[in-house]
Image (cartoon, rainbow, N blue to C red):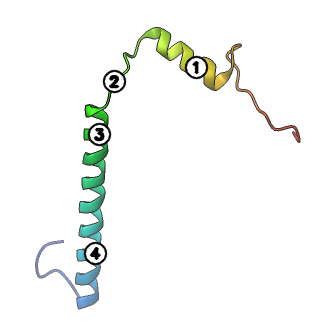
Amino acid sequence: MRAGAYRSIGEYFLDLVQQDQRRKAQAKLEALLLEGINSDALEVTPDYWQNLRESVLGHDGTATTNNADV
């Protein structure tokens, strides 16, 4: 919001809180991105993706459930 566009002190305060929340979320995102950049990287190859698919979907390529009640 631009300066002078607030109808009440409550609206102004709410905007300040929201700005602070956005700033904190942005700082957290930047920290997580830097952590990822600075971590030991895995090479992402076609084999990597295939292994990931198999671990999530199972070896036959279909989703598996471990829910015995279904």
Using a 10 Å C-alpha cutoff, classify the residue at mark 2 as few (fewer than 14 neighbours), some (14 to 19) or many (20 or more): few
Return the disc, 3 or 4, that comes first in the chain's sequence.
4
The crowding category of the residue bearing disc 1, from other C-alpha atoms within 10 Å (few below 14, some 14 to 19, many at least 20), is some
Vertical relation: 7 (above or below) 19: below
Badge 3 crowding class, 10 Å Cα cut-off, few under 14, some 14 to 19, many 20 or more, is: few
How far is disc 4 from disc 1 in space, using C-alphas?
A: 42 Å
Q: What residue type is labelled 3?
A: Glu
The percent coordinates of residue 13 (x first, y second) are 25, 83
Q: Nearer the viewer, mark 2 or mark 4?
A: 2
Which quadrant holds residue 16? bottom left
- Dot 2 or dot 3: first in sequence order is 3
Mark 1–mark 3 distance (CA, rounded to whole Å): 25 Å
* Residue, disc 4: 17
Distance between mark 2 and mark 4 Cα atoms: 37 Å
**How far apart in space, not on screen, are marks 2 and 3 (Cα)?**
11 Å
Q: Nearer the viewer, mark 3 or mark 4?
A: 3
Q: Are marks 1 and 3 in contact (CB under 8 Å)?
A: no
Question: Which residue is found at the position 58% from the left and 20% from the top?
Answer: 53
Can you identify the residue that label 1 sits on?
53
Q: Residues within 10 Å of mark 4 (few under 14, many from 20)?
A: few
Image coords of residue 45 (percent x, y) = 41, 11
Helix, strand or loop at label 2? It is loop
Q: Distance between the residues labelled 3 and 4?
A: 27 Å
Secondary element type, mark 1: helix
- Which disc number belongs to residue 41? 2
Which residue is painted at 62% across and 22% down in the image?
55
> In the picture provided, is 35 more to the left or to the right than 68?
left
Task: Look at discs 1 and 3 and give the one toward the viewer.
Answer: 3
Q: What residue type is labelled 2?
A: Ala
Which of the two discs, 2 and 4, labels the residue nearer the N terminus? 4
User: Disc 1 residue type?
Assistant: Arg
